[in-house]
C-alpha cells in the first residue's frame, strides 16, 4: 500500500496593497489580514500587457510589531506560506469559496538590501 503526500507551498514577491486589519477567527485566535499584489507580463498576440493578481494574506495575531509597521501599501514584500480554501454560504444561500495564503515567513527585500 502506498501513501501519497502533497506539497502546499507558496512563495510571493510583490507589493503590499492594503493596510493590515485584525480579525478574529474564533473566540481564542485572531489574525492580521492584508492584500499583496503581484505583477507579471502577459503576451497577448504581439502585445505585452501587465497582469495584476491580488492575494489575500493572513498571518497569526502574534506577528511582531516590526512586521506590522512595515505592512504599508507600496512596500515590497516576500512571503512564504500555504494556500487555504474555505467555504461559506452567502445571504442568498449560495455556497461560496474563499482562498487565501497563510503566511509563515515574511521579509522586506528593500530593507535587507539597505542594511
Image: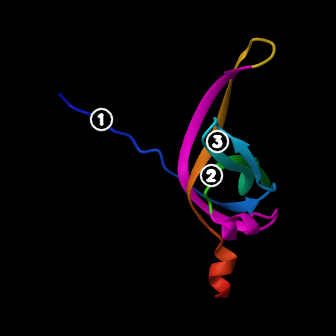
Q: Secondary structure at mark 3?
A: strand
Left or right: residue 16 versus residue 60 is right
State the image coordinates of residue 89 (x, y, percent, origin top left). 71, 18
Q: Is 71 situated above or below 23?
A: below
> Which residue is the extreme one toward the left?
1
**98 or 39, nearer to the observer:** 98
Indicate which disc residue 54 carries. Answer: none
Quarter of the image containing the N terminus? top left
Q: Is residue 43 visible?
A: no
Relative to 114, does residue 25 appear above or below in the rendering? above
Residue for point 25% across, 33% down:
3
Q: Position of residue 42 (x, y in %)?
A: 72, 52
Residue 19 coordinates in the image, percent (x, y): 81, 56
Whether tag 1 and tag 2 are in contact, CB under 8 A, the answer is no
Rounded to the nearest angstrom, the CA distance separating label 2 from label 3 is: 10 Å
What numbered label is drawn on residue 4? 1
Indicate which label's residue lies in the foreground, 1 or 3. Answer: 3
Q: Is residue 90 above or below residue 66?
A: above
Mark 2, Cα crowd under 10 Å, few <14 / some 14-19 / many 20+, is: many
Residue range (magenta): 64-89
Of badges 2 and 3, the one in the foreground is 2
The number of numbered badges drawn on the structure is 3
Please provide percent x and percent y for residue 16: 76, 60
Amino acid at each position: 500500500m502506498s501513501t501519497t503526500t502533497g506539497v502546499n507551498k507558496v512563495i510571493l514577491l510583490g507589493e503590499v496593497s492594503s493596510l493590515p486589519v485584525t480579525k478574529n477567527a474564533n473566540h481564542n485566535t485572531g489574525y492580521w489580514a492584508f492584500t499583496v499584489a503581484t505583477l507579471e507580463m502577459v503576451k497577448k498576440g504581439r502585445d505585452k500587457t501587465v497582469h495584476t493578481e491580488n492575494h489575500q494574506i493572513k498571518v497569526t495575531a502574534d506577528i511582531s510589531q516590526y512586521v506590522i509597521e512595515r505592512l504599508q501599501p507600496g512596500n515590497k514584500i516576500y512571503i512564504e506560506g500555504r494556500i487555504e480554501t474555505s467555504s461559506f454560504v452567502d445571504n442568498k444561500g449560495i455556497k461560496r469559496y474563499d482562498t487565501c495564503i497563510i503566511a509563515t515567513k515574511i521579509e522586506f527585500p528593500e530593507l535587507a538590501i539597505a542594511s
